[in-house]
Image (tube, helix red, strand yellow):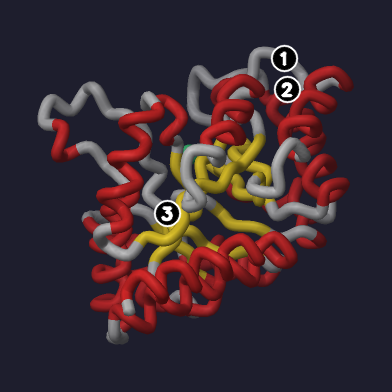
């Protein structure tokens, strides 16, 4: 059993989402968390949970997509979406991105802090993005006491020291497809404690890839779990079971939705 802890299927039509879910099911994916990147897409991610029991949602504004501060109005809109269904299980995708050309840093800090506040108010973990900003992200996590809700460092590509700091703060390391090709990341992943790893694909429509079969989808979790098994010299079954258990632990009370999906999967397989 596998869980795609972070992706963006909201850009697909409902019919396409269902075919993506079916392909994921065929390799043992029992749940997929779609993360919003704007208020609007957060709303669509929450709505998508009505399409299939396997779809869960994250609500949040991505640092790359910020056009304004998270003022009271924006905060209330996010709050309303996050409480519209118990299938919104995380506040995501939030964070800091200091690459050139990204939104104003003051705006990013403000939005990150406000959305951690929202997560703490709702007692939901955060899934955060960090690009060229690891020290600043860790500092904000400490200052805003994000460790009280926990969560995951998404699309992890940093060094072992950064992973350790995030883990010490109570966060999980979320590994994605870069694990299949980045040698440095493979070295780091081989040394990470398995009890602190979750898996994701960050899937989204990729029209720039002409061959549709090559678009990243939640079904690619299987490849990521097999790679991690090879790197950690463990059985792939152990990798899949432990990363799934990790994500449930990360969700806390919201993990009840996962338990029912596990039961359904086990019954289907009998
Ligand atoms: Zn993402």
Marker disc for residue 259: none
> What is the crowding at mark 3: few (fewer than 14 residues within 10 Å), some, or many (at least 20)?
many
Q: Quadrant of residue 209?
A: top left
Quarter of the image with the N terminus is bottom left
149 w.r.t. 100: above or below: below
Q: Please name the residue that numbered disc 1 is placed on.
A: 68
Q: Please name the residue that numbered disc 2 is placed on.
A: 107
Tell whether label 1 touches label 2 (CB within 8 Å).
yes
231 w.r.t. 100: above or below: below
Estimate the spatial distance between the alpha carbons at disc 3 and disc 1, rounded to whole Å: 28 Å
Position in image of residue 20 (x %, y %): 30, 42
Residue occupying image coordinates x 38% and y 77%: 239
- Label 1 element class: loop
Residue occupying image coordinates x 77% and y 39%: 83
Position in image of residue 140 (x %, y %): 76, 46
Position in image of residue 141 (x %, y %): 74, 51
Query: Residue 130 or 33: which is nearer the viewer?
Result: 33
Q: Please name the residue that numbered disc 3 is placed on.
A: 200
């Amino acid at each position: 059993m596998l869980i795609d802890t972070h992706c963006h299927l909201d850009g697909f039509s409902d019919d396409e989402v269902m075919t993506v879910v079916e392909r994921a099911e065929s390799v043992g994916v029992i749940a997929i968390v779609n993360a919003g990147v704007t208020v609007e897409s957060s709303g669509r991610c929450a709505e998508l949970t009505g399409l299939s029991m396997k779809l869960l949602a994250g609500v949040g504004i991505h640092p790359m997509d910020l056009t304004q501060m998270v003022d009271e109005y924006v905060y209330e809109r996010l709050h309303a979406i996050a409480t519209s269904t118990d299938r919104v299980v995380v506040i995501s995708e939030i964070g800091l991105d200091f690459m050139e050309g990204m939104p104003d840093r003051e705006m990013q800090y403000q939005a990150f802090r406000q959305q951690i506040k929202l997560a703490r108010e709702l007692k939901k973990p955060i899934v955060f993005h960090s690009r060229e900003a690891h020290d600043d992200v860790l500092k904000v996590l400490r200052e805003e006491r994000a460790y009280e809700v926990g969560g995951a460092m998404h699309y992890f590509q940093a060094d072992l020291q950064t992973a350790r700091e995030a883990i010490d703060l109570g966060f999980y390391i979320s590994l994605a497809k870069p694990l299949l090709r980045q040698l440095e990341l493979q070295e780091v992943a081989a040394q990470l404690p398995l009890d602190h790893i979750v898996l994701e694909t960050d899937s989204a429509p990729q029209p720039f890839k002409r061959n549709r079969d090559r678009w990243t989808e939640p079904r690619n979790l299987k490849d990521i779990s097999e790679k991690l098994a090879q790197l950690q010299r463990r059985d792939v079954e152990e990798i899949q079971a432990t990363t799934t258990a990790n994500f449930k632990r990360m969700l806390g009370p919201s993990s009840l939705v996962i338990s029912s999906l596990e039961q359904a999967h086990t019954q289907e397989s009998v």
